[in-house]
Image (spheres, grey):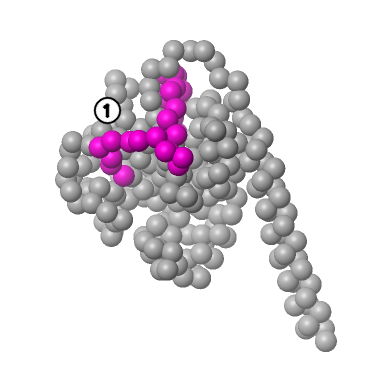
């Protein structure tokens, strides 16, 4: 009987925590940050892109402020195609990225490690020749100062070798134009791939959610 009571209490506690997490996620996601944007000259175009679950930040490969191809090299993608114009950045749990190319490949151990801060992280970069606005891809015009802050945040997310180059992960990719690199921080329920993207927007003084673990919490502020 004592064991049954313990199991019941444990299950109720888990349900309660999930409810608190869900309610907090919704409420904090709709609270805006940097809502009032200045009228500074908008010199750069970026995109936020979602696959329905995960948010990427899509930036031009080359501008006067940054040429990403000097560090995120075309030779590290299968196609070796150097005619791409945009580069998408995503951050996430390394195990989830590398071991779960499809949802059907998801293992309990992978999900558990990701949820409870037990894994390591990776940066996922994807080259694009063109980007089109859709329901899941929003175009944003930003100032020079905002773009510089975005660059700084993204650069700080990578791990670097002694030569100052991002540490490339030689692993199976999702296609011919993407690659993985070692990253800082660890994924958990409170700092997800979407939290990372939202944090990047906040640091760049762009519209963002107060906190969100989901892509919808980001896109809500760009409707």
Residue 172's quadrant in the figure?
A: bottom left
> Is any part of residue 179 visible from this angle?
yes
Seen from the viewer's position, the closer of residues 89 and 49 is 49
Seen from the viewer's position, the closer of residues 1 and 220 is 220
Q: Residue 17 placed where, x, y %? A: 72, 59
Image vertical order of residue 7 relative to residue 218, above or below: below
Task: Judge whether residue 128 is colored magenta.
Answer: yes
User: Which residue range is magenta in the image?
Assistant: 126-154
Task: Judge whether residue 30 is colored magenta.
Answer: no
Q: Residue 94 placed where, x, y %? A: 41, 56
Residue 41's quadrant in the figure?
A: top left
Q: Residue at horizontal 53%, vertical 25%?
A: 205
Q: Residue 35 placed where, x, y %? A: 61, 25
Task: Tell whether 19 sits left or right of 107.
Answer: right
Q: Residue at horizontal 29%, vertical 20%?
A: 64
Image vertical order of residue 142 relative to residue 178, above or below: above
Image vertical order of residue 36 relative to residue 213, above or below: above
Q: Residue at horizontal 40%, vertical 51%?
A: 122
- The quarter of the image holding the C terminus is top right
Farthest residue, direction front: 134
- The residue tagged 1 is 62
Query: Which SS class for mark 1?
Result: loop
Q: Residues within 10 Å of mark 1 (few under 14, many from 20)?
A: some
Q: Residue 182 placed where, x, y %? A: 36, 50
Task: Tell whether 117 sits left or right of 6.
Answer: left
Seen from the viewer's position, the closer of residues 131 and 93 is 131
* Tally of marks: 1
Q: Residue at horizontal 60%, vertical 50%?
A: 190
Residue 93's quadrant in the figure?
A: bottom left
> Is any part of residue 91 visible from this angle?
no
């Amino acid at each position: 009987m004592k064991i049954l009571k313990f199991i019941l209490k444990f299950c109720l506690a888990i349900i309660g925590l999930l409810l608190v997490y869900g309610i907090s996620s919704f409420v904090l996601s709709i609270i805006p940050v940097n809502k009032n944007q200045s009228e500074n000259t908008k010199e750069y175009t970026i995109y936020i892109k979602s696959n329905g679950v995960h948010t990427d930040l899509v930036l031009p490969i080359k501008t006067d402020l940054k040429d990403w191809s000097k560090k995120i090299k075309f030779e590290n993608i299968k196609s070796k195609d150097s005619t791409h114009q945009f580069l998408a950045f995503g951050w996430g749990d390394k195990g989830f990225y590398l071991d779960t190319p499809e949802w059907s490949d998801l293992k309990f151990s992978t999900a558990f490690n990701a949820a409870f801060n037990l894994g390591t992280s990776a940066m996922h970069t994807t080259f694009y020749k063109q980007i089109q606005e859709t329901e899941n891809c929003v175009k944003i015009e930003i100032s020079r100062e905002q773009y510089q802050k975005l660059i700084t945040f993204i650069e700080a997310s990578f791990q670097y070798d002694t030569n100052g180059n991002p540490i490339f992960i030689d692993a199976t990719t999702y296609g011919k134009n993407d690659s993985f690199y070692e990253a800082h921080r660890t994924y958990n329920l409170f700092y997800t791939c979407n939290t990372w993207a939202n944090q990047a927007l906040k640091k760049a003084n762009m519209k963002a959610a107060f906190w969100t673990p989901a892509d919808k919490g980001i896109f809500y502020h760009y409707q």
